[in-house]
């Protein structure tokens, strides 16, 4: 039996991508980030829907993820690999026509020697200090790289979800200084960068989380619903405690429902005694600790025994859950457990 049902609205996903495509502006290509198995929603299904919506360039974290997307889409769409050309990836990159975003001189050498003449992109470090060639490295190899014909030059904004952060302008300035005059398509913006405005769009944008219904795109339509079946209810009397460690003791009689989900399914333990599940628009507080496979919630006020309780629903989206857990929506999305039954709605033909 599945621990819960994850409902994925593929039409909402496509509409979110189209909205970010419009925000990217005329003459700008809008790609799509489908890493981490399509942010936990099924990379193959997600990629096919976004291809139908108009995306022709996809971004993944690792070559193995690129294999999943290539198998889903077939030949044609460009699949860019953020981690670049890693040792041992040469055959996969070559066989599946992936485009590594080369991050270092070592990767540049590996690609030129292992797959001469094959497509590649370049990632530059404009201040995030994570991936990419630093300005001095780029200056040393720029002419060699440009002669080899990269298909894309990109960098990544560290603080795009904070529009007023000075790092945004600093990175934009650095990116322009490193790339102006290159005559190669450029990309700087994920979802947050798209929303910063045209100065950040360049030739290609690559929205991710906003497509899946989360911040930093507040106008995004919800894409995901998550429901857990109730497997048992009981009355808890005043003074009785619930769950591991007895972290909740009932001050008065409570009716408690136990649902089949836990931290093994991506339900953060930080939701213990803080989060809430929902039934038909009514919140049901989580009582006691979230355990590996089970959660207990207060249904005293419902006056009925619900067949299921919802974590993600119209009343509570992924970012609201993240706020309660003290994390971000990205982590909630990509932690969604594999034990859930996945129910796709919309996306005809995918």
Image (cartoon, rainbow, N blue to C red):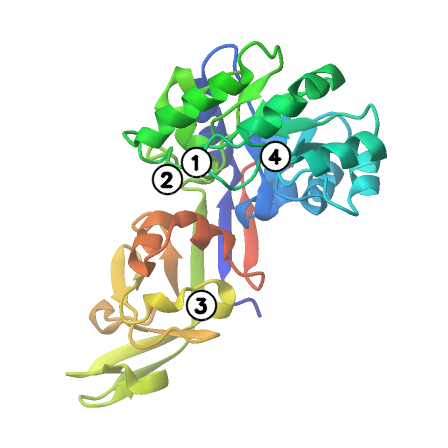
Q: CA distance from mark 2 to mark 3?
A: 28 Å
Does residue 309 sit above or below 76 in this rendering?
below
Question: Which mark lies nearer to you, 1 or 3?
Answer: 1
> Which residue has dot 2 on it?
215
> Which residue has dot 4 on it?
59
Q: Are marks 2 and 3 in contact (CB under 8 Å)?
A: no
Question: Which mark lies nearer to you, 3 or 4?
Answer: 4
Q: CA distance from mark 4 to mark 2?
A: 19 Å
Q: Are marks 2 and 1 in contact (CB under 8 Å)?
A: yes
In front here: 346 or 100?
Answer: 100
In front here: 209 or 165?
Answer: 165
Q: Is residue 46 left or right of residue 167?
A: right
Q: CA distance from mark 2 to mark 1?
A: 6 Å
Does residue 136 sit above or below 287 in this rendering?
above
Mark 2: which secondary structure? Answer: loop
Question: Which mark lies nearer to you, 2 or 3?
Answer: 2
Mark 1 surroundings within 10 Å by alpha-carbon count, few (fewer than 14), some (14 through 19), many (20 or more): many
Q: CA distance from mark 1 to mark 3?
A: 29 Å
Q: Position of residue 124 (x, y in %)?
A: 56, 29
Q: Is residue 225 left or right of residue 83?
A: left
């Amino acid at each position: 039996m599945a621990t819960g049902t994850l409902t994925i609205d593929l039409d909402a996903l496509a509409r979110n991508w189209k909205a970010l495509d419009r925000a990217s502006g005329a003459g700008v290509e809008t790609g799509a980030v489908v890493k981490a198995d399509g942010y936990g929603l099924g990379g193959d299904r997600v990629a096919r829907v976004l291809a139908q919506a108009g995306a022709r360039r996809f971004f993944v974290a690792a070559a193995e993820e690129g294999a999943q997307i290539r198998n889903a889409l077939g030949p044609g769409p460009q699949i860019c690999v953020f981690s670049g050309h890693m040792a041992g990836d040469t055959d996969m990159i070559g066989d599946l026509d992936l485009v590594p975003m080369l991050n270092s001189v070592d990767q540049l050498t590996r690609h030129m020697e292992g797959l001469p003449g094959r497509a590649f992109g370049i990632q530059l470090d404009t201040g995030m200090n994570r991936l990419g060639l630093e300005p001095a490295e780029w200056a040393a190899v720029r002419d060699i790289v440009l002669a080899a014909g990269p298909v894309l030059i990109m960098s990544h904004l560290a603080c795009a979800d904070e529009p007023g952060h000075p790092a945004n302008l600093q990175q934009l300035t650095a990116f322009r200084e490193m790339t102006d005059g290159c005559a190669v398509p450029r990309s700087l913006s994920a979802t947050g960068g798209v929303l910063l405005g045209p100065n950040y769009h360049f030739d290609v944008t690559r929205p991710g989380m906003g497509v899946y219904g989360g911040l930093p795109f507040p106008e995004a339509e919800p894409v995901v619903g998550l429901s857990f079946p109730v497997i048992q209810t009981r009355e808890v009397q005043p003074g009785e405690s619930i769950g591991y460690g007895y972290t909740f003791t009932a001050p008065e009689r409570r009716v408690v429902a136990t649902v089949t989900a836990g931290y093994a399914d991506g339900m953060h333990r930080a939701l213990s005694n803080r989060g809430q599940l929902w039934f038909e628009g009514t919140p049901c507080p989580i009582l006691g600790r979230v355990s590996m496979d089970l959660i207990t919630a207060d249904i005293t006020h419902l006056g009925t025994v619900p067949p299921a309780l919802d974590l993600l629903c119209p009343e509570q989206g992924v970012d609201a859950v993240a706020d309660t857990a003290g994390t971000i929506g990205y982590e909630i999305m990509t932690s969604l457990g594999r034990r859930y039954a996945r129910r796709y709605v919309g996306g005809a033909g995918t």
